[in-house]
Amino acid sequence: MPPKIELFVENCFQEFSPVVAENSGVTHAPVSEYTWENWFDQWLEILTPELPPAPSYEIGLRLTNDAEIQELNAQYRQQNKPTDVLAFACLEDNFPQTEEMLASQPLYLGDIIVSIDTAQRQAQQQEHSLSTELAWLTAHGLLHLLGWDHPDEESLMQMLKKQATLLDAVGIIVNFK
């Protein structure tokens, strides 16, 4: 049985930058909440061997702009510049969880924050759609939530290959450069 996921999607992009949204052609969510849920369901099924055992999981996904992600990047990574995706993994904390807790509520994996501003620029550079770039970045964030990291070129290549596998599973083919 595939793992159950509770996904909370916040599309904050329009409330922060309606002018940029109109100029970029993004005046509504480029990916529907239903599509996000479908993607995460499929991704977690593939990643089941890497998931800590739980009856269900919870993830937050926030789509925002460069200004907000820059604030978060400065606050949590001491890098005062926008970035494309941030992942705040809860599994890194040694929070005690009993069997009763796991049975009564989903295991919270963490939050993924994606800048639509940066995603739009990167989509144009990579010559693919904004939704493809959002899927790429979100899959990257999901892998970070599960403990993946890329401190060197070899681990980065492994992570990029896993991202490509996740996107392929939802019908998105990406040739990463």
Image (spheres, helix red, strand yellow):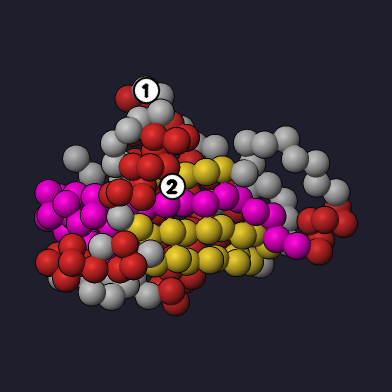
Where is 73 relative to 169, above or below?
A: above
Residue found 86% across the figure and 52% down from its top: 99
Instruction: Check the picture and name the quadrant holding the N terminus.
Output: bottom right
Where is 63 relative to 82, above or below?
A: below
Disc 1 residue type? Answer: Asp
Disc 2 residue type? Answer: Gly
Q: Which one is earlier in the sequence, the residue at label 2 or at label 1?
A: 2
Q: State the image coordinates of residue 148 (x, y, percent, origin top left).
A: 49, 36
Where is 8 relative to 68, above or below?
A: below
Residue bearing the label numbered 1 = 152
Instruction: Check the picture and name the quadrant holding the C terminus.
Output: top left
Q: State the image coordinates of residue 48 (x, y, percent, origin top left).
A: 60, 53
Start and end of the magenta stretch?
A: 105-132
Q: Judge left or right: residue 31 versus residue 92.
A: left
Tag 2's secondary structure? helix
Distance of label 2 from label 1 (alpha carbons): 17 Å
Q: State the image coordinates of residue 90 (x, y, percent, origin top left).
A: 62, 44
Residue found 23% across the figure and 55% down from its top: 117
Tag 1's secondary structure? loop
Residue 141 image label: 2
Q: State the image coordinates of residue 72 (x, y, percent, origin top left).
A: 42, 42
Q: Nearer the viewer, residue 100 or 111?
A: 111
Q: Is residue 137 visible?
A: no
Residue found 37% across the figure and 22% down from its top: 152
Q: Is residue 7 magenta?
A: no
